[in-house]
Image (spheres, rainbow, N blue to C red):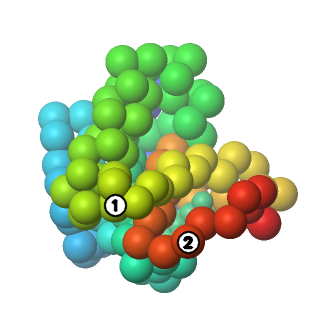
Amino acid sequence: MAGEPQADCLFCKIVAGDVPATVVRETETTVAFRDIHPQAPTHVLVIPRVHYPDAAALAVAEPGIAADVLREAGEIAAQEKIDGTGYRVIFNTGAGAGQTVFHAHAHVLGGRGLNWPPG
Ligand code: AMP
Ligand code: ZN
């Protein structure tokens, strides 16, 4: 069924508690945890508990949960105190754009200067 946990998905395992993660915030529909290879002083991933391969697929199937992910990105920015200096929310989509985990996730990055356009 759409949105069901996938046995081979790393982030479904984090949602289930089968793989450890440094969780910084949780809601009924989302989990936020620190990226294991941080690219900035603050680098948190916000994921929906349900499994969809990318953010666009999530938004089509579960628009309310896609909105939850965006709201939580803002909550993380406030909690991490990067909202004042500015932060970036990124959804890498497709292997060509650097997506390596095919469970929708927002990267929340901040705490350093962020160049535009990104590489
Ligand atoms: P992406 O490349 O956009 O698919 O992002 C996947 C992110 O997940 C990368 O930034 C990885 O560093 C991160 N990552 C991979 N494994 C883990 C893990 N076990 N815990 C936390 N973050 C992870
Ligand atoms: Zn998954």
Instruction: Sort mark 1 into few (<14), some (14-19) or many (20+) by Cα contacts within 10 Å.
Output: many
Identify the amino acid type marked 2.
Answer: Gly
**The C terminus - image quarter:** bottom right
Outermost front residue: 84
The x, y position of residue 117, in whole percent, is 77, 57
Asked if residue 72 can be seen in this view, the reply is: yes
Residue at 19%, 56% (x, y): give it: 79
Q: Quadrant of residue 7?
A: bottom left
Q: Is mark 1 within 8 Å of ligand 1?
A: no
91 up-or-down from 33: above or below: above
Q: Residue 82, which numbered label?
A: 1
56 up-or-down from 110: above or below: above
Q: CA distance from mark 1 to mark 2?
A: 11 Å
Q: Earlier in the sequence, mark 1 or mark 2?
A: 1
Q: Which residue is mark 2?
A: 113
Instruction: Sort mark 2 into few (<14), some (14-19) or many (20+) by Cα contacts within 10 Å.
Output: few
Residue at 43%, 28% (x, y): give it: 66
The x, y position of residue 56, in whole percent, is 61, 30
Dot 2: element: loop
- 35, 41: nearer the viewer: 41
Residue at 56%, 17% (x, y): give it: 60
Residue at 37%, 37% (x, y): give it: 69
Identify the amino acid type marked 1.
Answer: Ile
